[in-house]
Amino acid sequence: LKQKGLELQKKYEAEGNEVYLSASPCYGACDIALDEARWIGAEKIVHVGHNKFVKTDLPITVEYVEYNIDVDIDSLKLVLPYIEKYKKISVATTVQHHHQFPLMKKFFEDNGKEVFIEAGYWAAKAGQVLGCDALGIKKVEKNIEVVVFIGNGLFHPTAIDIDPSIPILLYNTYTKKVNDVRADIERMKKKRRGSLAAALSCKKFAVLLSTKVGQFNPGFAKWAKTELEKRGFEASILVANELEPLPVNNFWVYDCYINTSCPRIVDDTEEFGKPILNIDMLKEFFALIDSKPS
C-alpha cells in the first residue's frame, strides 16, 4: 500500500490539504500513526487498508479507508470438491476482500451449503478474521463441520482456534489452490507449548509493553511484574513502540519475555531467541509453578 502513497498524496493535495506520508511500519488497525501526527500538528489521520479496531476515543480524528481487492467469485468452485461431504460451513476472509462477502456467502449457499458467520470482538464485521481475532468463528464452532478461509498467507487463518477435528481450508486467491492449514496451526501450538516448558527454568523476566495505541496494556504489564515478583522471580517492564528482537535482546540478562502487546509476537520466538509467553500463557505458567510442592 505504501507504493500508493504518492497517488494518495496528489489526491488529497488537490483537495487543498497539506499531506505527510507515514514511513513507519504499520502492523494493522491497532497501529495508528499518532506520534507522527502529533509532531506535525495533523488534524486528521487517514489510515488506509484496515477498518476500525481501537474502541476508545483518540486525540486525533482517524478516517479508515479500506483497500478493496476483488476475488474471482466464480473461482470459488475450486473449493467445492474439498467440502463436498460437508453441509454446514463457516466462511471467513480479510478486510480487503470483505466487500464481496455477501457474494461469497451466496456462492456457497447456492451450492447447497448452510453458512454460519458471526462478528468477532476486534473484527467488527461478520466473517472477518484478524491475526488476533477469529472469535466470530469460535462463536459458531458447534454449528459447523469445516471452515473456508478466502485470502492468502497463513497469518490470518492460523488465528482460528477451534475444535481440532474441524478442517480449516485456505483458498489462496492468488495461486487458486486449497490447503488445510491444520498442520500449521498445530505447529504453532507446539511452539507455544515449547515456550511454556522452557519458561519453567527461567529466573529473570522482561515484560514487553508496546505504546501502539491498540496494543497498549499497562495494566497487564504491571500485573505480570507484580505476580512474577510475588513468586520470587526478577522482573522488569520494557516499554517501546517497536518491540523488535535486536533492541530488546540488548537487555541480555533476561531469560524469558512476557508479551502484553500483539499476541502474535509469540510466533517469533526463534527471532527473539528466548521463550515468549502471552498473558494467557503466563497464567498457565503460574498454575504450574503454584502446583509444585513447596
Image (cartoon, rainbow, N blue to C red):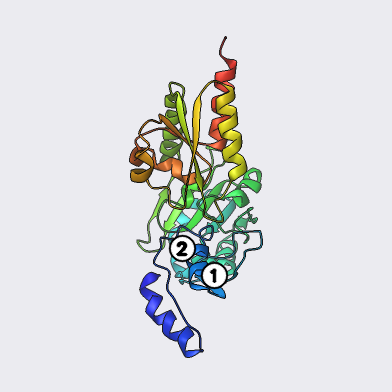
* Residue 62 - label: none
Q: Can you tell which quarter of the image residue 62 is in?
A: bottom right
Placement of 40 over or under 203, stated as above or below:
below
Q: Which residue is mark 1?
A: 100
**Alpha carbon separation for disc pair 2 and 1:** 16 Å
Mark toward the start of the polypeptide (2 vs 1):
2
Number of the label disc, if any, that sits on residue 77: 2
Residue 48 visible in the current orientation: no
Residue situated in front as seen by the camera: 89 or 256? 256
Who's the residue at 41% across and 60% down the image? 25
Q: Residue at x 34, y 39 (%)?
A: 250
Q: Position of residue 235 (x, y in %)?
A: 50, 30
Q: Secondary structure at mark 2?
A: helix
Report whether residue 136 is seen: yes
Amino acid type of disc 1? Gln
Residue 162 locus on image (x, y percent):
56, 41
Q: Is residue 116 above or below residue 224?
A: below
Mark 1 residue element: helix
Which residue is more in the foreground, 136 or 177? 136
